[in-house]
Image (tube, rainbow, N blue to C red):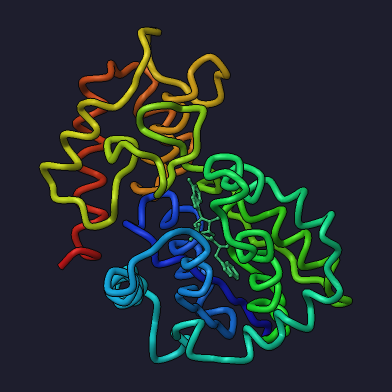
Amino acid sequence: RKRIVSGVQPTGSIHLGNYLGAIKNWIALQNAYETLFFIVDLHAITLPYETQQLAKATRDTAAIYLACGVDSSQASVFVQSHVHAHVELMWLLSAAAPIGWLNRMIQFKEKSLKAGDENVGVALLTYPVLMASDILLYQSDFVPVGEDQKQHLELTRELAQRVPEPLIPPAGARIMSLTDGLSKMSKSAPSDQSRINLLDSKDAIANKIKRCKTDSFPGLEFDNPERPECNNLLSIYQLISGKTKEEVIQECQDMNWGTFKSLITDALIDHLHPIQV
Ligand code: TYM
């Protein structure tokens, strides 16, 4: 059987972007592949962290995997730092990784720019080499991730002779913020209003949807570049409801925001409920 590997950092709250871009796709693929899903705690220490909090977040992330439907009787679910070979391979690969390639990584540029060169550890630069090790150690065939990891996957391919391909879902690969349809939903965005966390209460979900950014065009539509929020919310609704894009268009094209917001709120609450109990 072909093998897939993937992981999520145990930083802060796991949000809908992590779920729709990655974890939900793992579940969809897990019966067809041999699977390894790890909690990448070593990646999480590349930015400031607190030991107790990291330990808790690591356990919580494992619980989220299972709650989302990862089948632990089939998948290998484990903590990255428990398998020392990840770091050992990283050292070997880092000797083959040109600094220039790492300097060009968008996530590194963004994060280091924000914190300033004097305040970020070298590990933030070499982070993608550790990710390459996570993948190459297991000779993975596919890596189901969201779009923001594509560049890291390309680096992995360059670093390796074999070629793992990213498995990016056709929809959900880039879930956008609730407060700005042009930015990615992100754990590190300062406002919690910008994301739905998987463990948000019903009231929090309802409140976030109520306050999320919309527009004043008539009706609702996908793919209008002037309406990024509308496209994002319809896409989320499509994924959560399990409907096709065409079905969502039929159902929602003539709706106003009020009607749609109550629809998506109920759908989110229903979809997340089994994960939360
Ligand atoms: P992390 O923890 O930032 O994100 C976990 C997964 O969620 C996806 N994702 C999104 N997808 C859609 N829309 C969004 N707004 C969104 N935000 C995040 C990410 O693409 C990712 O799939 N470096 C990785 C973790 C990692 C890894 C690996 C992944 C370490 N080693 C080996 C695969 C294989 C990361 O920081 O993901």
- Write down the quadrant of residue 263 in the picture: top left
Number of numbered tags placed on the structure image? 0
Residue 61 drawn at (x, y percent) = 34, 71
- Observer-nearest of 52 and 214: 52
- Observer-nearest of 30 and 86: 86
In the shown orientation, is residue 149 left or right of residue 182?
right
Res. 94 visible in picture = yes
Tell me the quadrant of the picture where the N terminus can be found: bottom right
Tell me the quadrant of the picture where the C terminus can be found: bottom left
- Write down the quadrant of residue 4 in the picture: bottom right
Instruction: Tell me if residue 86 comes above or below residue 64 in the rendering.
Output: below
- Write down the quadrant of residue 78 in the picture: bottom left
Residue placed at 33% from the left, 58% from the top?
A: 12
Res. 67 visible in picture = no
Instruction: Tell me if residue 251 comes above or below residue 125 in the rendering.
Output: above
**Furthest-left residue in view?**
203
In the shown orientation, is residue 150 left or right of residue 186?
right
- Observer-nearest of 253 and 184: 184
Residue 207 drawn at (x, y percent) = 16, 34
Residue 45 drawn at (x, y percent) = 48, 67
In the shown orientation, is residue 188 left or right of residue 136?
left
Instruction: Tell me if residue 114 comes above or below residue 100 in the rendering.
Output: above
Residue placed at 64% from the left, 68% from the top?
A: 143
Residue placed at 60% from the left, 47% from the top?
A: 112
Residue 196 drawn at (x, y percent) = 30, 45
